[in-house]
Image (spheres, rainbow, N blue to C red):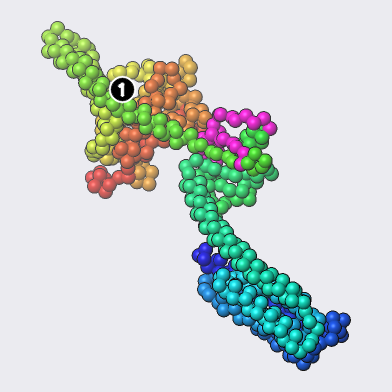
Amino acid sequence: MPAARQQHSLRRELYLFALYRLFESALLALIVFSPAGALLGEMHMPELARTVSTTYVVLSGVLLAHAWRLYRAGPLLRGGVLPHVVVGLGVDLAVVFLATHALPAAGPGIALMFVFNLAAGALFLSMPWSMAFAGAATAALLTQYGWQRMEDVAERPLAEVLMFAVAYVAVAALMHHLGRQMRAAQRLADQRSAEAANLAEVNELVIRRMRIGVILVDGAGRIRMANEAAQVLLLDDADGDDHPMHGRMLSEVAPELAERLSQWRQDGQQNELPMACGPDDAEVLPRFTRLLATSDATLVFLDDTSLVSRRAESLTLAAMGRFSASLAHEIRNPLAAINYATQLLEESQDLGASDRRLLQIIHQQCMRTNGIVESVLGLARRERAKPERIDLVGFLRHFIEDYRLIVPEENAQIRLTGEPARLPVMFDPRHLQQIVTALVNNAVRYGHLPGEVPRIALHVEESGGVPVLSILDRGPGIPDAVTSQLFRPFFTTSENGTGLGLYIAHELCRANEAELEYVPVPGGGACFRITLPPQNTLLQPD
């Protein structure tokens, strides 16, 4: 394609050359046919002068039409330039020879005009062709000089003829060299242009695919460019537009970001606090830099801090998995010892009924703690759940009975609400036990007002064939500022909490194809809703 573009450029210059030739022919015709031509002197051969000038105008028009057709043919057409230049210079040379003889007084001017034609032709021709035309022009001048001597016409000085001959050769050589340099420079420019275009495409692709949002904002606060990551962070729906932010004001798209940009332009200080952007309130950290030192345009980089948080979570979970694996046997050993000691105590004949009941509680809690260790290890190893068919209502009733043995009713009131008498579901019972325990413990610890006894409701319902379990309390609720971080690992608002309870419950729900979400309760309180997998027809009660 660079070669084709160069050919197209040459044909454009050829068209301008042909247009100049038509101007020359018109000027020669004006000298011959107008009364003003008498000011230059008498014509030696008037008929020859009229014939040559008329023919030159016609041929110039034909050559101009041919040059226009070559120019309009487009960059893919090859060739056609060399034949046109050769024919055109041949016509110019013949006109110079005949017109100089017919108009001796205008001879020097006509010969001087041919200097430009020869110079322009040498830009298109090779060195042999350029020297050939320069030699032919020199021979024509010498022949014309001899012809005028024989006819005893007003003689031209021989020195003038020789000077024109030297000028023809010098101009042809110089312009050919200049033309070769111009073509080399054009090829280099086309090559550099193609490389620059490729680099621009690569840069655009890299910027468009970057995970960091990039926005170019001009001095007036108008967005000139934004990559895909920035559009995802700041816009809800692009409406099918490839550039939905282009041309819009930054204050319209992200008012807080525009305010930070204005503040940075005033004091030059970067604000290191993340900010919420877009319809999803994604946390981003904006960074600003000037595009050029003398420009008002600013590049805005939007770092999605959630990516950093997810990477940190991944590293934390990996470390937790390794730590859990190494700590598992250390936990199981004392559990096994406690369990074994409990079994030995149960064999004693000196224990009363209440003491034996306490030993049963110890034994059950040892088994439950061991199950929790297994669940954490399974979560760290990403083991699949082992769902079983269970009756959700019966499971929760048994859970409440066991929980009241640990936490008396005067310390926490737990009740089961809902319409269904039984609700079969497919769920891993160990996981469900751990999930409900974690949610109820949170409700007992945080879900009550000061001086009141925690009142917790386990509400069971079936919505559209989907089992739903809600754990509700009547406490102060959860602030809106922390709801988006509830299920992140190690996030806690308590000094004594680990921040793993809700996260493990959320992950265990996902492992069982269920969904755990927080639902605000109007008027106070909190609700954690578990949407279980839809029922299978085989699980319907008889």
**Magenta residue check for 284:** yes
The quadrant in which residue 368 appears is top left
Q: Give, as a three-letter code, the residue at label 1.
A: Tyr
What number of labels is visible?
1
**Magenta residue check for 23:** no
Q: Nearer the viewer, residue 486 or 367?
A: 486
The correct choice, above or below, for 302 with respect to 114 in the image is above
Q: Magenta part of the protein: which range?
A: 266-291
Q: Nearer the viewer, residue 240 or 67?
A: 67
Horizontal arrangement in the rendering, residue 509 relative to residue 152 (left or right):
left
Horizontal arrangement in the rendering, residue 458 relative to residue 165 (left or right):
left
Q: Residue at x 57, y 64 (%)?
A: 180
Q: Residue most toward the top?
A: 350
Q: Residue most toward the bottom?
A: 47
Q: Secondary structure at mark 1?
A: helix
Q: Residue 244: where, in percent of width, then height?
A: 57, 51
Badge 1 crowding class, 10 Å Cα cut-off, few under 14, some 14 to 19, many 20 or more, is some
The correct choice, above or below, for 423 with respect to 106 in the image is above
Q: Residue at x 67, y 81 (%)?
A: 140
Q: Nearer the viewer, residue 423 or 527?
A: 527
Quadrant of the snapshot with the C terminus: top left
Q: Residue 215: where, in percent of width, then height?
A: 57, 44
Q: Is residue 408 visible?
A: yes
The correct choice, above or below, for 284 with respect to 217 in the image is above
Q: Residue 63: where, in percent of width, then height?
A: 64, 81
Q: Residue 41: where, in percent of width, then height?
A: 85, 83
Which residue is labeled 1 in the image? 403
The quadrant in which residue 109 appears is bottom right
Q: Nearer the viewer, residue 356 or 32?
A: 32
Q: Residue at x 36, y 30 (%)?
A: 315
Q: Is residue 253 visible?
A: no
